[in-house]
Image (spheres, coloured by chain):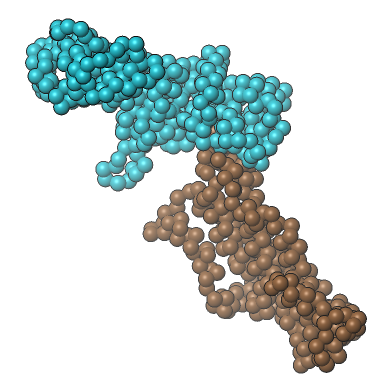
Chain colours: A brown, B cyan
Amino acid sequence: MFVVAPFLWALSTSFKDFQSVNSKVTYIPWVDYEPSLEGWKVLIKSPAKGGVDIVEPYFNSIFVTCTASVISIVLGTLAAYALSRFTFKAGFVRNNDITFFFISQRIMPPIVLSIPFFIFLSTIGLLDSLIGLVVVYIVLLMPIAVWIMVDFFNRVPKELDETALIDGCNPYQAFYKVVLPNSIPGLIVAGMFCIIFGWIDFFFAFILTFTEVQLLPVKVVALNSSVTPWWSLSASALVSVAPLIIVAFIVERYLSKGNLSGALK
Amino acid sequence: MAKIDLSNISHTYNPNVENPTYALNPFSMTWKNGDRYAILGPSGCGKTTMLNIVSGLVRPSGGKILFDDKDVTDLITESRNIAQVFQFPVIYNTMTVYDNLAFPLKCRDFSKKKIEERVQSVSETLNLSSFLNMPARKLTADQKQLISLGRGLVREDVAAVLMDEPLTVIDPDLKFRLRRSLKEINEQYKTTLVYVTHDQNEAMTFADNIIVMDQGEIVQVGLPKDLFEKPKTTFVGYFIGSPAMNLFSSEVSSNNSIKFNNLEINTRTDLSKIKNKKVKLGIRSEFIKIANEQKDNVVNVKVIRVEDFGNFKLITGKIGDFEIKSKVEREIPISSDNLKLYLPADKCCIYSEDKLIQ
């Protein structure tokens, strides 16, 4: 009820026109109101023809989210494996402190990072660019990957690595031939969170882009003007969450297997 | 296959503190090529640390390890060509049973034909042939442990197969059969097998040589018979055998006799050079017999209880404050509350400061 109702509301609104939304309460298509595709058409029409064209921002979002997520997972998994399996000491700093340092990046309010990121990207000439956004999103997503994967690797018995070494692997082979394939559920969970957090970010997409590049959340918000176009807002909301729903369905069975479920013992 | 020398090996897990606690006190030992060894001791005595040092998972704080006189102390695990089986099954979940068994051979670039041949042979020995194409994760815990064991046995050229309580999760029937299989493998391929256990029966039935450890120290190495009849320390006497060895605090009374609870007991041990007159008399319950008449080394015992174990009776009695246990044939009737027990002089072990006087 609570999950499906807002979607149904958005779906029905996306097929309404100005009259059907603003005049009276309408529920049933063809009875209460005449369905219209206007809300959907606006999304793909070019601005010159009175549309908003979210196709390009859509692909921009897919590119930035996927690239940043993949890089974050690769780097985060390597860092997490090291933090889980080796003991680091530097003054008073220990493994747990390093893990906390990663996650503390997420504890900080995003506004704190906005000026440094802005200056950093403008200095290296990547402001208002996809690559610049990818760099920033890696910083945002990698702590999530590290945090999830450290916990995951801690639950993988170290005897698994040791067995691989005894069987003839070197430490790198033990990692990618044995530990990594056994960690696929963890990788999927971490990837899922990275995609979600990357996809829904509005703040940095808004601060660090202007005219050259736009991401989907910014474009959706930009739809709102003096007259709120509920029909196209609803349609854009639905297409925005669609990728997350598809990903969630595909990996749903892995989410419930976030740990190894005792499979190693 | 190799001769393994452990030369002055010691290990501590906290080397940087001022007075480190040693998980393994310095010791030297040689494991001969093709022999079967059992490392026996209570939990936390350093058995696993010793295995991990040999396999290279732990670098010893001191000493050297030599495989066929070649120093391998600094050699990484994968270069030592050792097989090790852990207490709990460790399998590669994402692989089939066949791939699990073949993995050590694939890592070492064996030919496909050889891999096939070895996997078939090991899977037949371990009754895994019908599961070869199944995902390993779908097997039961004891079948998974068989896979771990199989990965240890699949290489014929290993320096040694180290097993850390590998049969803990396996049911008793299969356990017995597997021990036999391991012995056969050892006899057939002359593979050095090192078996860690805290179960003395397992150690006694499996190994030619038993290494008894206590608190990071090797307290005795020997044949099962030696460990049973002549335990070198009171710990070994207590740890080996069921029930544990009878131990009585005594005093030396002459060159070959001791006194406890005002009873004179003759022994075959020369006690003339003993400085500390306080000693312990140790005797196995198996060697204590019921006597019909009073003579030397016969003690009067007040029977507390008699337990029938099916194949023998265990008498528990009191001599003053001391408790004594004796195993007797179950056919012998125990009628009286008072019993005469005979302690054969040649079976009496005398311990000074918990060490056997030879």
Residue in the image at 64% along x and 39% along y: B137
Residue in the image at 14% along x and 8% along y: B294
Report x, y in % for residue B348.
22, 14
Q: Is residue B76 left or right of residue B29?
A: right
Whether residue B306 is visible, yes or no, is yes
Quadrant, the C terminus of chain B: top left
**Image quadrant where residue B6 sits:** top left
**Image quadrant where residue B58 sits:** top left
Report x, y in % for residue A3.
70, 71
Q: Is residue A61 above or below residue A69?
A: below
Q: Nearer the viewer, residue B258 or A241?
A: B258
Report x, y in % for residue B68.
47, 20
Residue in the image at 71% along x and 72% along y: A1
Report x, y in % for residue B196.
43, 28
Q: Is residue B285 left or right of residue B197?
A: left
Q: Nearer the viewer, residue B273 or B137?
A: B137
Q: Is residue A143 above or below residue B173?
A: below
